Image (cartoon, rainbow, N blue to C red):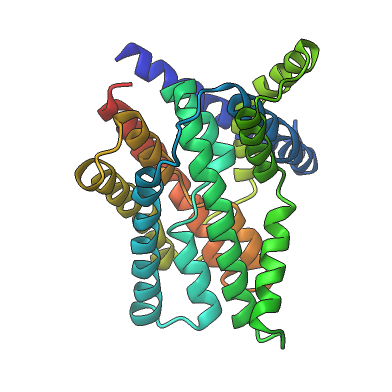
């Protein structure tokens, strides 16, 4: 019990420090942007590349792991679509933000540090595999649907090209792909390079948590609380529940993998939802409020999962 409490305190303590120092103006939001770019473009890709290039990979792609998570994602997407369309009667663009707000996890700034800290390095492979599909599937389809709803005059295949061009520019995807390629081909690299990558990778967890807290300080409950609570209920409760049921009752994947997938699903709504809302001028207030509420709820739901797993 003491170890679990210590883990929860460490994880959220670092994020809280980031939140407070920005509120006290000891650390600026501009500096936070720079730190987040370091996390996304350098430290997390380095962590993923080094881990995947050195670990023992399974001989076949773990389809059951992927199915456990992404069948649940489909269920959540359809639930969000139905709620936003028939209950809140939102127009198409706002429906997209609502729907993906309930399925798009904060995988990098919160998911990676919490899951690796809680479950250990053994969780890295299932975690990074799920994150790679997360970026390709959710980011690309959300881009396509928002482009279509914006009525910009483009073609469907033009939207697809735009979406996948963005995916190919994602350093995290490249960190995963190159790590797997180096592993499968047996390609090595000098000890000095490995030590350099190790030092960079060690910054990933504390910098991710700190920048998460710092960035969260810029968000607030701005309106549309009812819809935001609905998004949070879908994201924080329904999503992990579906993943756990599929992973343990339907597909019977290893316990560590089931715990990894469930914790990833329990992460709050990702900041990308606000970025897309702002870019397409759709549901900006709702996305801001949903991120804030979902994050607050996740402090309790993620902590409860860690206690339940007995980590």
Q: Position of residue 87 (x, y in %)?
A: 33, 78
Q: Position of residue 163 (x, y in %)?
A: 67, 66
- 251 is higher (above) or lower (below) than 291: above
Q: Nearer the viewer, residue 8 or 92?
A: 92
In this view of the protein, can residue 54 be seen by the observer?
Answer: yes
- 252 is higher (above) or lower (below) than 14: below
Residue at 51% over, 41% down:
129
For residue 175, what is the image quadrant?
Answer: top right
- 208 is higher (above) or lower (below) than 216: above
Q: Position of residue 104 (x, y in %)?
A: 49, 55
For residue 41, what is the image quadrant?
Answer: top right
In this view of the protein, can residue 222 be seen by the observer?
Answer: no
User: As drawn, is 36 to the left or to the right of 85?
Assistant: right
**Quadrant showing the C terminus:** top left
Q: Position of residue 20 (x, y in %)?
A: 62, 32
User: As drawn, is 298 to the left or to the right of 244?
Assistant: right
Q: Nearer the viewer, residue 123 or 115?
A: 123
């Amino acid at each position: 019990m003491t170890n679990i409490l210590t883990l929860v305190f460490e994880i959220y303590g670092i994020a809280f420090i980031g939140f407070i120092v920005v509120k006290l103006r000891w650390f600026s939001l501009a500096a936070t942007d720079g730190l987040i770019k370091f996390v996304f473009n350098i430290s997390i890709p380095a962590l993923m590349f080094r881990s995947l290039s050195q670990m023992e990979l399974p001989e076949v792609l773990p389809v059951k792991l992927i199915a456990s998570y992404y069948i649940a994602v489909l269920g959540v997407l359809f639930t969000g679509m139905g709620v936003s369309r028939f209950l809140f009667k939102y127009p198409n663009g706002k429906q997209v933000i609502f729907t993906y707000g309930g399925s798009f996890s904060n995988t990098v700034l919160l998911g990676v540090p919490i899951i690796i800290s809680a479950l250990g390095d053994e969780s890295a492979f299932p975690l990074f595999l799920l994150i790679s599909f997360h970026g390709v599937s959710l980011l690309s389809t959300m881009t396509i649907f928002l482009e279509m709803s914006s009525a910009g005059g483009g073609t469907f295949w033009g939207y697809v090209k735009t979406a996948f061009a963005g995916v190919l520019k994602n350093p995290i995807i490249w960190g995963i792909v190159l790590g797997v390629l180096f592993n499968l081909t047996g390609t090595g690299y000098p000890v000095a390079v490995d030590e350099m990558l190790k030092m960079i990778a060690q910054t990933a967890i504390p910098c991710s948590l700190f920048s998460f807290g710092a960035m969260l300080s810029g968000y607030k409950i701005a309106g549309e609380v009812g819809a935001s609570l609905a998004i949070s209920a879908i994201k924080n409760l329904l999503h992990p529940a579906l993943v756990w049921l599929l992973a343990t009752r339907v597909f019977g994947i290893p316990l560590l993998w089931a715990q990894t997938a469930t914790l990833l699903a329990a992460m709050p709504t990702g900041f990308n939802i606000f970025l897309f809302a702002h870019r397409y001028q759709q549901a900006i207030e709702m996305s801001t409020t949903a991120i804030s509420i979902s994050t607050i709820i996740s402090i309790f739901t993620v902590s409860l999962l860690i206690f339940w797993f007995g980590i």
